[in-house]
Amino acid sequence: MTVLGIETSCDETSAAVVRDGREVLSCVVHTQEQHRPFGGVVPEIASRCHVRLLPGIVARAVEESGVGWDGIDLVAATRGPGLASSLLVGWSFAKGLALSLGRPLRAMNHIEAHLHSVFLDPAAPPPDECLPRVGLAVSGGHTSLFRLDAPDRIAALGRTVDDAAGEALDKAAKLLGLGYPGGPVVDRLSRGRTPREGLFPEGRVREGTLTGGLDPELCWSFSGLKTALLRRVQEAPPKNDDEVAQLACDYQEAVVGALVRRCDLALARTPGAKCLAVGGGVSLNSRLRAALAELCAARGVRLLLALPRHCGDNAAMVAGLAGMGRGIPSPEAFDLDIAPSWPVA
Ligand code: KG4
Ligand code: ZN
């Protein structure tokens, strides 16, 4: 099964060809730079950019795959969650393409695709040997925790009630004058430093907060962290680059600590858990990778991290997941609208 995947849920325009769910034949990703001066993604700029670039990127992905248009068995595209105007471009394009090629279409969930991204690494074990597992999708748009008992049995365990972890890092970087996106800069500045303890208390989700029925202990709140940083900077403005870097390191530690503690608790509550699978842009973070490795070693669980090129938004994870038989198939798919807040479970 050779799948052409399309991903346009935010500000990456991407197309990929993946065979049998795991073998990436091609993957073209364009990250839009136009948003940088705004310190965040501007939806209309993003969708207009997708409109301009997507046809060329899809053609390139097919060419680089070497299979040609005739070698494509299925078209799969992200239907949600994400920015509505961005999703509309990729999803409509995919419908037209599937019709013109005379191939079936599949509607894919973006978060579930992040959870699959770890299996695009040829060194990863087969997905069905990693059950049950805990999955964490952590990016600039989402922070969610799941338990997977079977490919089609996914239970939501936790999620953020306000900002995503990447968003929290991006906002901190902006406040510290480090530019956008902030995650990679914060990561770089923090290397080799020792975080000061207790400077940024972990945000807790209180009982009674709207968590959609999820256990508050497995949910996150990151918005207080950003306020704490703002207060700290106002009270004691960092005097030089070194003090800025130290604050970034302390802040990163609070974000990483919050992520790792929820993973630990989720693993503790998943009897027989074999793996922890982590995808999304923030999973590139070197401190998070090290802390998760420590956690998994202590728990005797295998850690599955996506290859760096598959951590951020990409179409290979979408095509791969479709190749595993997931997603909503046609003919139903042809009648589906986009779903900007489509839950995985
Ligand atoms: O998955 P992604 O490309 O797009 C979304 O779906 O959001 O993730 C982007 C996010 C941004 O918030 C960015 O700051 C963060 O991932 N990020 C990082 C690192 N690289 C990217 N966060 C921490 N450390 C990194 N090395
Ligand atoms: Zn994403």
Image (cartoon, grey):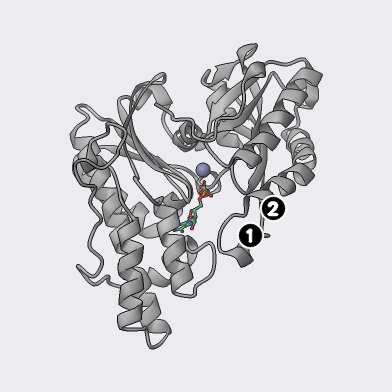
Residue designated by label 1: 35
Q: Residue sitting at 44 percent across and 54 percent down? A: 166
Residue designated by label 2: 45
Q: Residue sitting at 75 percent across and 27 percent down? A: 67
Q: Position of residue 201 (x, y in %)?
A: 22, 62
Q: Is residue 131 left or right of residue 285?
A: left
Front-lying residue, 73 or 205: 205
Q: Quadrant of residue 276?
A: top left
Q: Secondary structure at mark 2?
A: helix
Q: Mark 1 vs mark 2: which is more N-terminal?
A: 1
Q: Is residue 104 above or below residue 233?
A: above
Q: Position of residue 272 (x, y in %)?
A: 21, 27
Q: Is residue 21 visible?
A: no
Asked whether the beta carbons under mark 1 and mark 2 sit within 8 Å of each other, the answer is: yes
Q: Quadrant of residue 147?
A: top left
Q: Residues within 10 Å of mark 1 (few under 14, many from 20)?
A: some
Q: Residue sitting at 67 percent across and 35 percent down? A: 88
Q: Quadrant of residue 322?
A: top right
Q: Is residue 301 above or below residue 231?
A: above
Q: Secondary structure at mark 1?
A: loop
